[in-house]
Every structure is written in C-alpha cells, then in structure tokens.
Amino acid sequence: MSLAIWAARCTLVLLLLVSAPVITFVMEKRGLPEPAELEETRALPAPTLYLSQTSARTGDSVWLQCSVISQLLATRVVFCKDGEEVTSQKASEEKVIYSWDLVVSMRSSGNYSCGYEIKDSDNRVNGSQLSSAKHLSVTGKESERQSEYNCP
C-alpha cells in the first residue's frame, strides 16, 4: 500500500473517530432521529468514488476506490459501470474504503459509480444512492489487436 493511500486512510479514520461523539451529541441536542430512524426516513447518502486515472490504455490497471461514510454498517459495496453492477465486495466493520483493481480492455470505457447496501432491523436490504459517476476513457489500437485474431 502506498504511503499516500495509507495517509489518506489514517486521516479519514481519525476524522471519523473524532467526529462521531460530536455528531451524536448534536443529534441528541437537536432531537434529530437516531440511525435506525434515519434509514426509514430518507435515502442512504451516496459514497464517494475515486479513480486512479480517467484515461487509460488497454492492458493498464485502473484503481477504483469507493469511500463509504455512513452511521449504519454497510453489508455490501457495489461498483457499477454505466448504471449496471459489475462487481461487489462484502463490507467489513473495519473498512471505509473499498478498492477494485480494473484491468482495462476496450470495453472498459464508460461511467463508473459505486454504492453500498445495509440491512435494517428486519433484515431488509436497503441500497444507498450511487456516487457521482466518473468517466473512464480507454485509448488503444483496437484495430491492430483485432487483426492478430483474424482467421484467414
């Protein structure tokens, strides 16, 4: 893990640890709903998606990171391309950042987003809003690659 990623994770975790008591105190003083009531009254907030690069060549590796900050424990994190789920990961209590290493092909070009799911007290699955989409452009010489596989 690179130093920059490690530092970002530590900063985010520290921010969460420091902010949690303040958020709880403010919610109690203002009479705001508890987390269990929140899930019933409004949509789960969207996570944030980061791409290591927005333009890549076929064969490159693009790292997607989904940052899930929620008062409720996520059970599953999904990565989507053009609004369709392409992969998912089981969520963990210890994690707030979920990563996916995408090996780029010509079909990888598109709009990527992520979301997460929680289970409520009745074991019903509720999905978050999707993150803002990030566009990945793929460059490469697809015609040359295709010519390698043409049969005579």
Image: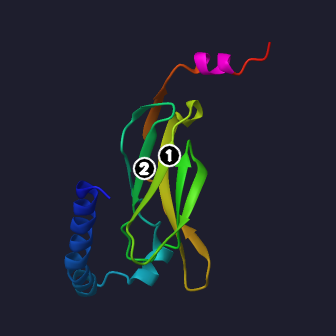
Q: Quick check: 71 left or right of 83?
A: left
Q: Position of residue 36 (x, y in %)?
A: 45, 83
Q: Quadrant of residue 45?
A: bottom left
Within 10 Å of the Cα at label 1, are there few (<14), some (14-19), or many (20+) other Cα atoms? few
Q: Nearer the viewer, mark 1 or mark 2?
A: 1
Identified at 54% across, 50% down, the residue is 80
Asked whether residue 132 appears in the rendered view, the answer is: no
Q: Position of residue 77 (x, y in %)?
A: 51, 63
Q: Position of residue 61 (x, y in %)?
A: 45, 41
Please state which amino acid type lies under the numbered disc 2. Leu
Q: Which mark is residue 53?
A: none
Q: Quick check: 72 left or right of 107?
A: left
Name the residue beneath numbered marker 2: 64
The correct choice, above or below, for 80 with respect to 147 in the image is below
Identified at 24% across, 68% down, the residue is 10
Q: Which sits earlier in the primary sequence, circle 1 or circle 2? A: 2
The correct choice, above or below, for 90 with respect to 104 in the image is below
Name the residue beneath numbered marker 1: 102
Element type at marker 1? strand
The part of the chain drawn in magenta is 143-148
Q: Position of residue 138 (x, y in %)?
A: 48, 29
Identified at 27% across, 83% down, the residue is 24
Please state which amino acid type lies under the numbered disc 1. Leu
Distance from the alpha carbon under mark 1 to that under mark 2: 7 Å
Within 10 Å of the Cα at label 2, are there few (<14), some (14-19), or many (20+) other Cα atoms? many
C-beta proximity under 8 Å, tags 1 and 2: yes
Magenta stretch contains residue 26: no
Q: Quadrant of the N terminus?
A: bottom left
